[in-house]
């Protein structure tokens, strides 16, 4: 038996700009892998930041990645202090493209003020959505939050 001193990692479902490796790199977080996943029973809003709301008619596409608790704390402190959104962890079950049904944490904000998203922010979500091969209807849904 080996003594592994590395901190444990937590599977996390990202659905907004944090599914973009370039955005995570801005806060010095570099997940080893991303796996496309789908979360049923929720809908996405980008007003002005990405957030999820319960819905029995929708599903949200994103990616799952493994991060340490310290990385998650750092990431969501950045969301709170720099972006102005307080996100809290929620346990979810996602359908991952390769791994099947898995449990993950998903960070959701209970009280974001609704405002128009910036085009740049929407781009930071739509770009990776296209790269990951999300369905065309879902990319259209993301694009619907682009300011007119």
Image: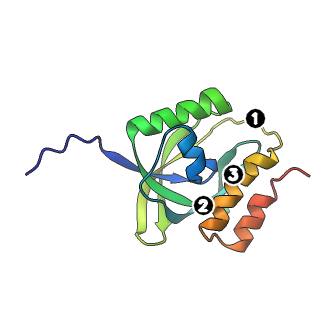
Separation of residues labelled 1 and 3 (CA atoms): 20 Å
| Horizontal side, residue 103 vs residue 115: left or right | left
Up the image or down, 133 lies above or below 7; here it is: below
Rendered residue at 54%/30% (across/down): 77
Separation of residues labelled 2 and 1 (CA atoms): 22 Å
Q: Nearer the viewer, mark 3 or mark 2?
A: 3
Residue 139 at what x, y percent from top left?
Answer: 72, 65
Residue 66 at what x, y percent from top left?
Answer: 41, 52
Q: Give the SS element for disc 3.
A: helix
Q: Which residue is mark 3?
A: 124
Q: Which residue is mark 1?
A: 113
Residue 102 at what x, y percent from top left?
Answer: 41, 62
Rendered residue at 52%/65% (across/down): 37
Q: Which sits earlier in the primary sequence, circle 2 or circle 1?
A: 2
Q: Give the SS element for disc 2.
A: strand
Q: Nearer the viewer, mark 1 or mark 3?
A: 3
Classify mark 1: residues with Cα within 10 Å, few (<14), some (14-19) or many (20+). Answer: few
Q: Which sits earlier in the primary sequence, circle 3 or circle 2?
A: 2
Q: Which sits earlier in the primary sequence, circle 1 or circle 3?
A: 1
């Amino acid at each position: 038996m080996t003594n592994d001193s590395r901190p444990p990692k937590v599977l996390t479902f990202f659905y907004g700009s944090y599914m973009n490796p370039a955005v995570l790199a801005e806060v010095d977080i570099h997940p080893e892998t991303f796996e496309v996943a789908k979360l049923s029973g929720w809908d996405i809003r980008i007003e002005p930041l990405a957030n999820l709301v319960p819905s029995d008619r929708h599903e949200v596409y994103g990616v799952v990645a493994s991060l340490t608790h310290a990385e998650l704390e750092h990431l969501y402190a950045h969301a709170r202090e720099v972006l102005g959104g307080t996100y809290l962890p929620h346990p979810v079950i996602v359908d991952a493209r390769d791994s099947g049904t898995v449990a993950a944490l998903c960070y959701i904000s209970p009280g974001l003020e609704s405002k128009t998203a910036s085009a740049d922010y929407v781009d930071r979500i739509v770009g990776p959505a296209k790269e990951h091969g999300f369905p065309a209807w879902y990319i259209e849904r993301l694009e619907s939050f682009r300011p007119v």
